[in-house]
Image (cartoon, grey):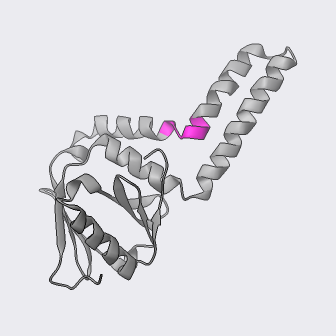
């Protein structure tokens, strides 16, 4: 299906902290950084085991062991994001209006308006709960699927993303 310019899709939603965390998980699943962090987690676990077996630094082994899940699951990011939102609650207030058209993606809130052309995006990711439009390292736009009124709109946006950005990568995972 090819989206004609007059077939714009506009959605409205209010983002939640969970939306932002899940978007980061979807994005991160495609990066080398996630794979390296998993190696760190294995390293921390092995080191903690060796410390316990060698009967030295037992108390330090607990700390090293606790670092493993933080590296594996990227647990510091949700904590940092929560702190940021607590310090600036305006980040999650108000309704967002997102319009997808032939030119790009247009976002509007009570505080700002922004348009990003399709050429700015490098990758489009899709999970069962959202689209994540990547436009730089650790820079992405989140579009929760719950904002769409029906599955036809989701299909329209998916086809538009395919035609403007290229392949839409299906990312399964924790998000």
- Residue 87's x, y, as percent? 30, 36
Viewer-closest of 98 and 1: 1
Image quadrant occupied by the N terminus: bottom left
Q: Where is residue 91 in the image (x, y as percent from the top left)?
A: 25, 46
Residue plotted at (88% across, 18% down): 54
Quadrant of the image occupied by residue 123: bottom left
| 10 with respect to 165 (left or right) | left
Residue at 29 percent across and 54 percent down: it is 144
Give the total number of marks visible in the rendering: 0
Tell me: 29 left or right of 48. left
Q: At 18% from the left edge and 45% from the top edge, which residue is drawn? A: 93
Residue 89: give x, y in percent of width and height: 23, 39
**105 left or right of 110 in image:** right
Q: Can residue 73 be seen in this view?
A: yes
- Is residue 10 positioned above or below 90 on the image? below
* Residue extending farthest right: 54
In this rendering, the answer to whether 2 lies above or below 35 is below
Q: Is 149 placed left or right of 76 in the picture?
A: left
The answer to if 72 sits in the magenta stretch is: yes
State whether residue 59 is above or below residue 2.
above
The quarter holding residue 124 reads bottom left
Pinpoint residue 51: horizontal percent, then vertical percent: 81, 22
- Give the camera-side residue of 9 and 20: 9
Numbered range of the magenta stretch: 70-76
> Quick check: is 104 in the magenta stretch?
no
Residue 108 visible to the viewer: no
SS assignment for the magenta stretch, majority: helix
Please, is residue 15 above or below residue 4 in the view? above
The residue depicted at 49 percent of the width and 48 percent of the height is 173
């Amino acid at each position: 299906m090819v989206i004609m310019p007059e077939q714009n899709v506009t959605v409205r939603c209010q983002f939640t902290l969970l939306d932002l965390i899940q978007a980061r998980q979807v994005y991160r699943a495609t990066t080398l950084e996630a794979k390296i962090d998993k190696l760190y987690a294995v390293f921390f676990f092995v080191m903690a085991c060796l410390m316990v077996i060698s009967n030295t630094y037992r108390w330090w082994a607990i700390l090293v062991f606790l670092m493993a899940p933080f590296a594996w699951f990227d647990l510091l990011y949700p904590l940092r994001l929560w702190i940021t939102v607590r310090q600036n609650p305006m980040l999650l207030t108000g309704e967002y209006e997102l319009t997808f058209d032939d030119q790009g993606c247009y976002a509007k809130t009570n505080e700002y308006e922004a348009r990003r052309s399709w050429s700015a995006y490098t990758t489009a990711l899709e999970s069962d709960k959202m689209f994540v439009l990547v436009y730089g390292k650790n820079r992405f736009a989140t579009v929760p699927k719950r904002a769409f009124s029906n599955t036809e709109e989701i299909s329209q946006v998916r086809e538009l993303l395919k035609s403007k950005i290229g392949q839409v990568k299906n990312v399964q995972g924790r998000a």
